[in-house]
Amino acid sequence: MDIPAKVVVKKMEDELRKLKASLEEQPNSTVYREQAVAIKTYCDLLLASEEAPKPLTAPKVQHATIKDVKTSSSTEQKVTNRDGNERSSIYDGSDEPESDSLLDF
């Protein structure tokens, strides 16, 4: 989740006001440590958000052109079925089955 830097700086300013107030009220006390740790955490958050890796982009996909499709259709094999009709083969050269049965493996 990306937190805008302005929001983090605003929170840091609020904690700094609290730190100043606690130092004015009790100068010898160690109560200010909580505000100092909060400010440090906000600083770390700001620094970490700048170091976040950029999202990866997918490489460009090269689509087939009309010329490629026409070239591949001209190389397809014609097969004559039982009725004597000629149709295009859906198989590559040596992958042609011996029969049209779905049960032949």
Image (cartoon, rainbow, N blue to C red):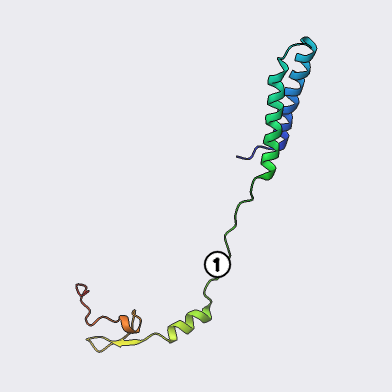
Q: Is 39 displayed left or right of 94 in the figure?
A: right
Q: How many labels does the image show?
A: 1
x, y percentage for residue 34? 68, 20
x, y percentage for residue 26? 76, 10
x, y percentage for residue 58? 57, 60
Q: Residue at x 68, y 25 (%)?
A: 38
Q: What element carries label 1?
A: loop
Q: Is 31 displayed left or right of 92 in the figure?
A: right
| Quadrant in the picture for residue 37 | top right
- The crowd level at tag 1 (other Cα within 10 Å; few <14, some 14-19, many 20+) is few
Above or below 66: residue 13: above
Quarter of the image with the N terminus is top right
Q: Is 45 displayed left or right of 93 in the figure?
A: right
Q: Which residue is drawn at 25% across and 89% down?
A: 84
x, y percentage for residue 32? 73, 17
Above or below 61: residue 23: above
| Quadrant in the picture for residue 48 | top right
Q: 67 or 11, which lies in front?
A: 11
Q: What residue type is labelled 1?
A: Val
Above or below 96: residue 41: above
Q: Which residue is drawn at 21% across and 81% down?
A: 99
Q: Is 50 displayed left or right of 102 in the figure?
A: right
Q: 38 or 69, which lies in front?
A: 38
Residue pointed to by mark 1: 61
| Quadrant in the picture for residue 28 | top right
Quarter of the image with the C terminus is bottom left
Q: Residue at x 65, y 37 (%)?
A: 3
Above or below 6: residue 25: above
